[in-house]
Image (cartoon, grey):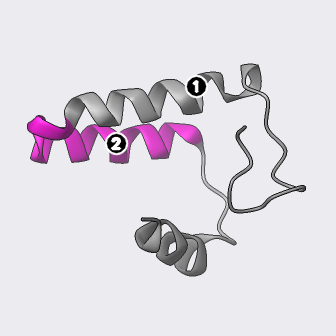
Amino acid sequence: MGDEIERLRAKRGDEDVKFAQVADHLRDFTDMRPDDGDVVQRVAALLADVEDEPHDHDADADHGLG
């Protein structure tokens, strides 16, 4: 698991985006694939509240959430 995440990091990792843009893309995805909506909603919840989760990407860039 993670090949597409690494592809995303390699292809778009240096770009600056706003979370509103990410939210728009997540909404587009759920519109196209409603059966995957629950997973996308969980990812959105994580992104919305990530500062409440213990994590350190400097210690482990691949798996910063602990």
Q: CA distance from mark 1 to mark 2?
A: 13 Å
- Left or right: where 9 falls relative to 29: right
Give yes or no for contact between labels 1 and 2 (Cβ–Cβ under 8 Å): no
Residue 48: assigned label: 1
Residue 31 highlighted magenta (yes or no): yes
Q: Quadrant of the C terminus?
A: top right
Element carrying mark 2: helix
List x then y, in percent, for residue 31. 14, 39
Q: Quadrant of residue 43?
A: top left
Left or right of residue 35, residue 14 in this image:
right
Q: Residue at x 33, y 36 (%)?
A: 40
Q: Please name the amino acid that badge 2 sits on.
A: Leu
- Left or right position of 61 against 28: right
Q: Main secondary structure of the magenta part?
A: helix
| The residue positioned farthest toward the right in the image shown | 59
Residue 35 horizontal/vertical position (percent): 10, 37
Q: Position of residue 19 (x, y in %)?
A: 56, 39
Q: Identity of the amino acid at label 1?
A: Ala
Q: Of residues 26 and 43, which is closer to you in this image?
A: 43
Can you give x and y, in whole percent of width and height, for residue 12 in the image?
56, 72
Residue placed at 79% from the left, 38% from the top?
55
Which residue is rendered at x = 44% and y = 74% of the image? 3
Image mark for residue 26: 2
Q: Is residue 26 above or below residue 42?
A: below
Residue 53 sits above or below residue 56 on the image: above
Is residue 54 a member of the stretch shown in magenta? no
Q: Which residues are magenta?
A: 19-36
**Mark 1, secondary structure of its residue:** helix
Few, some or many residues within 10 Å of mark 2 (<14, 14–19, 20+): some
